[in-house]
Amino acid sequence: MASFDPSEHPHRRRNALTGEWVLVSPHRADRPWQGQTEDPPPDERPMYDPDCYLCPGNDRAGDATNPEYTDTFVFTNDFSALTLDTPEGTGRPDDDGADDLFQAESERGICRVICYTPRHDVTLAEMPAADVRPVVDLWSEEYDSLGAHEHIHHVQIFENKGQMMGCSNPHPHGQIWAQESIPNEPRKETARQAEHYDRHGRTLLTDYLDAELEKGVRVVCKNDAFVALVPFWAVWPYETLVVSRRPVPSVSALTDAERDDLARLLQRLTTKYDNLFNTSFPYSAGLHQAPTDGQEHPEWHFHMHFYPPLLRSATVKKFMVGYEMLGTPQRDFPPETSAERLRALSDTHYRAD
Ligand code: H2U
Ligand code: ZN
């Protein structure tokens, strides 16, 4: 029998950030790569849409009206999933007798919406990096101000992009859910990062990034302060991880120059994404930063995750179903192949003149 070759044989890989496993079945990807086949209809949008609840000067739910903002704009979500005036409690009668089987706790929080730009017709990929920079600054301000609140122990900044990801409005925007407890994913990452830091005195992502830069096979693009790569344990076909070279706990610890580099890298990465299938690439993406729970978090290393659903074309997505829902996430072509494809794509947007 031939010896094990991870580029050919089924295997599992461990996500060092969460401790969870992904199944990789490279042999199933032997089908030749056909590249883009069908282009979706062009997505032509006006610069201003009088019916968009995020455009400047327009009305939102309730009595709110957006200001005539000129770069970014943030407001408290009119349909917040979490509020600060939620009463404390467990909602259980005292004589329940089965505490561990029926655990519940009230949860306080704040939900915000961030508009990246007054322009209705662009995305991060089509914004000049100089216009992405104010978005980075707003992330930093919101992380600091929300995190300073006594009941806010975690600030999740994210973006759902595209109808495929359930986004309700194409106006470029993200959301923030800031809350009392640490959500599942950052909780797992806190544990793994703390374990590594305690053992080695360096952040997990410092060591991981050093190794990835040395190997090079999974790196997509990089600049002085940031690297985008397809992680060794990527589950989604074109999943990426954006890591700061310097081990900082949050975006607010970045220098001026590092913030510029983050803006530039995000603009490049999202452009490559759009160029992959000549479409405005859908994804869920977000920042992972140190909890704001009043503890020191030297183990925490700021990063962003991009989870795009597309697999084969602008319309063919990967489904996380069946074995993946019941067992473990699985992928066919390996992360190294995704990185190679993304790396080879142009940094110039396919819609640019
Ligand atoms: P998506 O990012 O999933 O499209 O959500 C946009 C958010 O905007 C959504 O959470 C909020 C919704 O509650 N929203 C307002 O706050 N005010 C409005 O007038 C409409 C939508
Ligand atoms: Zn993370």
Image (cartoon, rainbow, N blue to C red):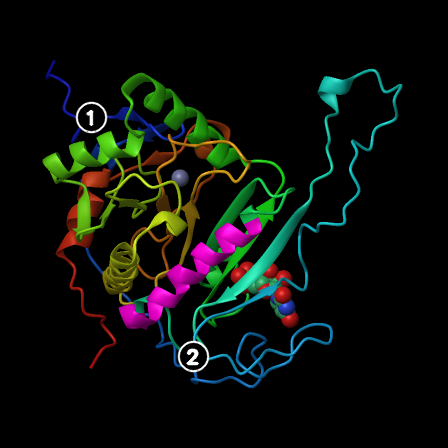
Split into quadrants, the picture shows ligand 1 in the one at bottom right
For this rendering, which residue is in front, 70 or 280? Answer: 70
Residue 32 shows which numbered tag?
none
Q: Earlier in the sequence, mark 2 or mark 1?
A: 1
Kindly tell me whether residue 114 is visible in this rendering. yes
Asked if the magenta segment contains residue 332, the reply would be no
Residue 216 x/y as whole percent: 12, 40
Q: Is residue 348 left or right of residue 59?
A: left
Q: State whether residue 159 is above or below residue 107.
A: below
Residue with the mark numbered 2: 119
* Quarter occupied by residue 150: top right
Mark 1 is on which residue type? His
Contact flag, marks 2 and 1 (Cβ < 8 Å)? no
Residue at 34% in and 65% down:
133
Pointer 2 local density, CA inside 10 Å: few below 14, some 14–19, many at least 20? many
Residue range of the region highlighted in magenta in the rendering? 126-146
Of the pair 43 and 77, the residue shown nearer to us: 77
Marker disc for residue 9:
1
**208 over 132 or under it: above or below:** above
Left or right position of 222 against 244 = left
Q: Magenta residues: mostly which secondary structure?
A: helix
The answer to whether the beta carbon of the residue marked 2 is less than 8 Å from any atom of ligand 1 is: no
Q: Hey, which quadrant is residue 347 in on the image? A: bottom left
